[in-house]
Amino acid sequence: MLGKWYGFILLLLILLAGCDDKPLNHPYPSENDETRVFYSHFTGRPKTLDPARSYSVDEALFTGQIYEPPLQYHYLKRPYLLTPLTAARMPVITYLNAKGDPLPKDADETQIAYSMYEITLQPGIQYQPHPGFAKDHQGQYRYHTLSKKEAATQQALVDFDETDSRELTADDYVYQIKRLAHPATQSPIFGFMENHIIGFTEYQQLLQQAYEENTNHFFDLRKYDFPGVEVVDRYTYRIYLKGKYPQFIYWLAMHFFAPIPWEVDYFYSQSGMEQHNLGFDWYPVGTGPYLLSENNPNRRMTLQKNPNFRGEYYPQEGELEDESKGLLTLSGTLLPIVDKFVFTLEREAIPRWNKFLQGYYDQSGIATDSFDEAIQIDALGKPELTSSIAEKSITLKTSIDPSVYYLGFNMLDPVVGGASERARKLRLAIAVALDFEEYISIFLNGRAVVANGLVPPGVFGYRSGKGGMNQKIYEFKNNKIKRRSLAYAKRLLLEAGYANGIDPKTQQPLILNYDAIGGAQANERAQFNWMRKQFAKLGIELYVKSTHYNRFREKIRTGNSQIYMWGWSADYPDPENFLFLLYGPNGKVSHGGENTSNYHNAEFDSLFKKMKGMDNTSERQVIIDKMREIIQGDSPLVFAYHPKSFTLYHQWVSPRKFSGIINNGLKYVDIDMEKRQSQRKQWNQSNFWPLLFLLGIFVAVLIPVVYRFWRKEHFPMDRID
Amino acid sequence: MIHFTFLTTDYLLFLVLTLLAICLCVSFRSQQFSVSWRQMLTKPLAMSSLVVLCFYITIGLLDSIHFRVPTAQGHHSIKVYSFFDKVIGESTTEKTYSAPLATHAYNKVSRLTPDGRIVRFYSALKHIPGHVLASHGHYVLDVVFTFLKASMWALFLWLALLLIWVKLSPHVTVKKFIRGDLPLAWRSFWITLGIMLLMIFMAHGMSGNYHVLGTNKIGHDVFYECLKGIRTALLIGSLTTLFMLPFAVLLGTMAGYFGGIVDDVIQYIYTTLSSIPGVLLIAAAILSIQVYIDNHPETFSSLASRADARLITLCLILGVTSWTNLCRVLRAETLKLRELDFIQASKALGAGHGRIIWSHIVPNLVHIILITAVLDFSHLILAEAVLTYVGVGVDPTTFSWGNMIDSARLEFAREPIVWWPLLGAFSFMFIFVLSVNLFADALRDAFDPRTRFGG
Amino acid sequence: MLGYILRRLLYAMPVLIGVNLITFLLFFSVNTPDDMARSQLGAKYVTQNAIEHWKQQHGYDKPLFFNQESVGTGKITETLFYTKSVSMFAFHFGRSDGGRNIGHDIVQRMWPSLALAAPVLLLGLLTNIILAIVIVFFRGSYLETGGLILCIILMSISSLFYIIFGQYFIGRVMQLTPISGFSGGWHGIKFLILPVVIGVIGGIGTGIRWYRTLFLEEINKDYVRTARAKGLSQMRVLFVHVLKNAMIPILTGVVVIIPSLFLGSLIMESFFGIPGLGSYTIDAIRTQDFAIVRSMVFLGAVLYIAGLILTDISYTFVDPRVRLK
């Protein structure tokens, strides 16, 4: 009986198929062959695209292409290299003493009271077209005095007919820095930046007060100045920091320091705008290679070439192997290359993966479970594609994320914490027993590398092989790095006073508490059991307490935990951003910093201070090595792993280089439209035989029905009722 | 000594079954009901589904007797075992996927040979005994042999039981049995029993050497997980009914009987509750209880007790969302009954309200309650899977078909496809729901006065 | 009639207040505004100051039900419950905890939901009624028994099975339709074929059985016997007379769910990537966005009550004997 519907579909499909020669399952409307469109997906609704608020990788996918901070990372070179983006040259950094007089470059850190960053922009950079800039004949802003009624009829930005642009100036950058302090913006980095930018804290208080008194719909930040920023001329501005914070230059490559034109802020502040989600959260305006032409976070996001983009060229040089990997074939091409990026919301893994295989997504970008099907990890730990995927000439690129996961010990805890030899040996014994190689292969499908310290590969200060090996946990045997044996761990435990894991106080197995972040993950039980099994190897009993993430953070904040697992994702690729996780004055309980284990070691702290301000020299490397040895010996954390991202793309996409740090990479992408079209056609031949099969069943059912019907109508006496 | 540690849900499940048994005994004493029951059991389909249901219930019950075993160090294990675990024995855990009855893993692994080459091969499963791995011929032989052995045992046991039954029952002869010339559908009873016995013996025999339904991502036996899911499904169905019935019956009859302000208040309550979309109410309740559990780790010390608390909450809130329907029906029916002569007569004779409701109204509503309860039972089992998918079902650590489907649907996109966890969960669920539905259908035919006398 | 509707609307008020109260109690009995602020603000560099700002910005810095510090009516009105509920009655849903305007999102997402739910309802109705009549026509024969057992089998299959296997076979193996997605206009049809077919098949089992009982009730009435006695054919009687008379319960049963069609289907929309209210709700549940969940609960309740009122009104149209007072 169901066959009826299949027949119906068949009919409809034939009708639809007659319309054009595309495969039946082609999910996109007809496209113009001349425009290069790149199709990809996003898995979750971005929360905000406001450069002062957005703080997640998914959002950076969009903001990275639209907003342009003064600096960017070089696309190909590693270790990461900062280059000017909208800036004319790299910022000039001057150190000042307490009186405000400039100091020489090599001045002693104790003398440096302030640092001044002077940034000069390239002239002539234009914003993307936007109605906020539009002016009428008299030179008045066309859409700055909208009546409530007018505003109510505008559903989206495209409903405004007139648009205009304006040249990028230093004021726009300063305006955005002020926005970071605006109480209504709630920038996630304000709490961090107020420790660095001069007068930022007081400025927020000032704004708070003024904001409450403000009666106009627009709160004009230009009227309020503070000593932390200064506009020198049309293209130059300065930022003043407290003391020396050399890593600040990395922040200048993040969207938090991108420009915002006041005209557009004014435009969005008008009443009625918010009701239609018209605001920086959803309608970014930037100078970047792309502009967000369609913004429907519930369905589709489209990035289109910014017609006012100043032009930039594909880099001429890269790393050694980049030439052979084909990464330099596009050298010198005018960027951006692709005309349009279409991102479709695809929450479920099955359709996402299938559509990628059918060729309807050019790239499958985010590391999820669906990668398990495509990739196998070989004996050497190298990922490779399964044969059926390799047949489609799909390219796999892996990159190590700039992040670290670790099992932390709360150093304030009387049992596992503290500097005593007993506690240290206990921690080391646990560190040896925790087999994270196994964890990675079971739970991450090999998508991670084991960590030997805080600094991940790809960031200055990381040392691979024997040099970086954690000698407390590993040993070098037969030219191979091997985890030390369980017997060794048991010996450590014995030395710590817990023979076979028995607590001398109670004569029962030692009980430790493990705080886990509870979610709705299906394989959580397996992970908890695994953790318990590792401790059981030492005879220690582990109580797993899984809590909600918020509650977990609260526990860490108050130091109310013993053992926990957490991670850190860096903001910039500098060892400082990792090693500060164990810097004493950064302690979570005492100072509310990010040192969650509340570790405190005077030698480590003094080395950290020294290392912080240095350039990437061999001297710095020596200090970092020393620091790593200290924390390997004290073992306040068991360094677990650095996760890897896997990205797959089709043969018609130009070779790409991925990294967890660079987020404006879309401008370097090219695609071969013809190849894509022919492959899509080849991969999407419809199969009609199951339909015939169903039709057969339908007929088979129909025969007795028709027969009965005929009998009933012709031999009424046969009736039963 | 083993140490019994019953979970709250265990107690509740036993409570439900005891209540059910009492109700059945009472109902058999009544002339009207025992006729209906007998009439129902003359239907072959009803009889077969009853047998299948009994098997499911037995497994669920065995799985609800929990205890800890002593360890070598002298204290009790942290892990809680159920009686059922001990009956079927622990199965070997493989590394990852393997297909049903396979001897080797589903995916190739690579290994570095001593001379530095990388070889790729399918690794043998730990669970498979060495002699089977020797060659393909051995494997086929072993499978066929196990199959034959299981069939023989099943047939033997079945025949023995059948003969004892024929001997013991006074009116049954072999001839009558074969012709189906018996007052109840005994023939389908025995056929179903035979099939079930065959299945059990085969599953048991095959489990000795193989993973009957393969293994899942972390190498656990899928067949074992499917069987463990029975208890959860049974709990969801029965506990929800337990929570729902008193409310529905009490409030429904009261609203219909007393009318006036009582009726208004009760109507207000159920209109309000039923106007909230069910899933959202469940979601809100489950999210809340989850936060509560997370914040009170001392009360819920073990993973099992946390999962248990969530399961009970789920049943409670499912009860809250599903009582309104029955309540509405009962109210309408009571309204009609209230006006009938015999009720008016007993009112005139001075009988108390409670007495009238209990001995005159409720007995006339039993068929509605019964049919609704059984029908709801099957809906609830299906609902569990959907809710778990949404993320507001049972705890992720609970063995349930919903959890299996939720974690296995990703595997459906694999290349090559991993189909057995999904198929296993769906078929166990399907057979259970189908037998409940067939049973409910027969129940309706037998008990509903409209179909009984009208149709 | 107008008076009746007004009275019903007035009666809906306490129900809606009750609905709001229940959601409030459920959420805030365990969840504090601090928790909500933390989950929305993200993981890094979150200070207590930022949390306070967030609460103030989103209006969560008030007591729940009773404000000790206020005077007069402020004790009641300056509370979370009051401020968050009152605007709801004017359909001002405010902004979600994530920052978007909920009303705008709801209006935008209503239509995709309807585009899926309406065809499923209509086609389902058509299929179910036709098949039910066929089964009634063959009553007493093995075709009826077979059909009914088939129905029971169909309704014993989990809806997830239909979706997962349907998507696999039609979308992946046969490659007849796009696996998921949505688009407005005529082009959107090809996205809807698969979910609509699955939706219809998923509802067939229960549907047929329900309509069959309706028809069986009608068929035993006198007018059918009269019609048959006059020599009308069985088919004619069933499709013309019985169907016409059974229309009253069918119609009223359908009218009650029409408003709820806007709410969409949670699972279907999520699996097929349809940007409707169902997937909106699922997202909100998963990200624990209380503002959205509360709005959806309220909307659901309003639509449910609207359905009840519409049903009463539709009675007067199909059955002239009914008068609403």
Image (cartoon, coloured by chain):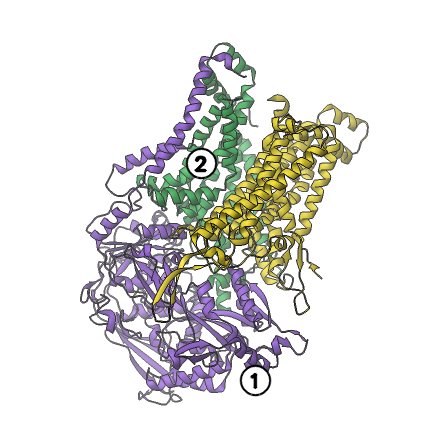
Depth check, front residue: A626 or A212: A626
Let me know if residue B177 appears in the view.
Answer: yes
Circle 2 chain: C
Q: Residue B395 sits in which quadrant?
A: bottom right
Q: Amino acid at mark 2?
A: Ile
In this figure, what is the number of numbered marks?
A: 2
Q: Amino acid at mark 1?
A: Glu
Chain A as rendered: colour: purple
Chain B as rendered: colour: yellow
Disc 2: which residue: C201
Give the CA distance from mark 1 to mark 2.
69 Å
Which chain corresponds to the colour green? Answer: C
Q: Residues within 10 Å of mark 2 (few under 14, many from 20)?
A: many
Judged from the image, the secondary structure of the residue bearing numbered disc 2 is: helix
Picture layout, residue A510 above or below residue C181: below
In percent of width and height, residue A225 lies at: 36, 73
Quadrant showing the N terminus of chain A: top left
Picture layout, residue B406 above or below residue A237: above
Left or right: where C246 falls relative to B454: left
Judged from the image, the secondary structure of the residue bearing numbered disc 1 is: helix
Picture layout, residue A156 above or below residue B161: below
Same chain shared by disc 1 and disc 2: no
Circle 1 chain: A
Q: Which mark is residue A421?
A: 1
Q: Residue A316 sits in which quadrant?
A: bottom left
